Image (cartoon, rainbow, N blue to C red):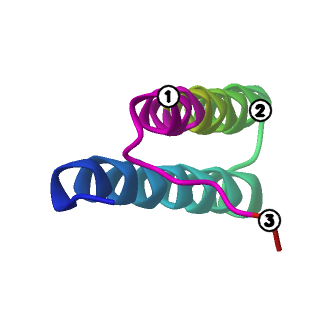
Amino acid sequence: MEITFKLPALILFGLIILALVEAIYFLAKDHGDKDRTRVAQALSIRVSLALVLFVLLLIGALLGLVKPHGI
């Protein structure tokens, strides 16, 4: 896998982790009605980034940049 393909995938993965930490923080720290909105927003961002990462890996597999293997 080339470095030009690895870097965006790693950045997306880091952003997914960051969005998850943000959602956990909002869930633990905030109270009230707007809390659920902030938690839901952070989790929807995480899901969106995960879908983008999945599509990126799928495109990489189709172009031969990622070689899937069995375990």
Q: Which residue is mark 2?
A: 36
Tag nearer the camera, 2 or 1: 1
Vertical relation: 24 (above or below) 12: below
Q: Nearer the viewer, residue 26 or 30?
A: 26
Give the mark nearest the N terminus, 3 or 2.
2
Describe residue 36's horizontal placement relative to residue 65 as left or right.
Answer: right
Give the mark nearest the N terminus, 1 or 3.
1
Give the magenta part as a residue range.
Answer: 53-69
Q: Which residue is mark 1?
A: 62
Q: Residues within 10 Å of mark 3 (few under 14, many from 20)?
A: few
Single out the residue that lies furthest toward the left: 4
Residue 11, image x and y in percent?
A: 32, 54
Describe residue 3's horizontal placement relative to residue 23 as left or right.
Answer: left
The C terminus is located in which quarter? bottom right
Q: Residues within 10 Å of mark 1 (few under 14, many from 20)?
A: few
Vertical relation: 43 (above or below) 37: below
Q: Residues within 10 Å of mark 2 (few under 14, many from 20)?
A: some
> For residue 67: magenta?
yes
Asked whether the residues under the numbered discs 1 and 3 touch, taking CB atoms below 8 Å apart as contact, a structural biologist would say no
Residue at mark 3 to residue at mark 2: CA–CA distance: 40 Å
Disc 1 element: helix
Residue at mark 1 to residue at mark 3: CA–CA distance: 17 Å
- At a point 69% along the width and 60% down the height, the residue shown is 24
Describe residue 48's horizontal placement relative to residue 18 as left or right.
Answer: right
Q: Amino acid at mark 3?
A: Gly
Q: Amino acid at mark 1?
A: Leu
The N terminus is located in which quarter? bottom left
Q: Which residue is mark 3?
A: 70
Q: Amino acid at mark 2?
A: Arg
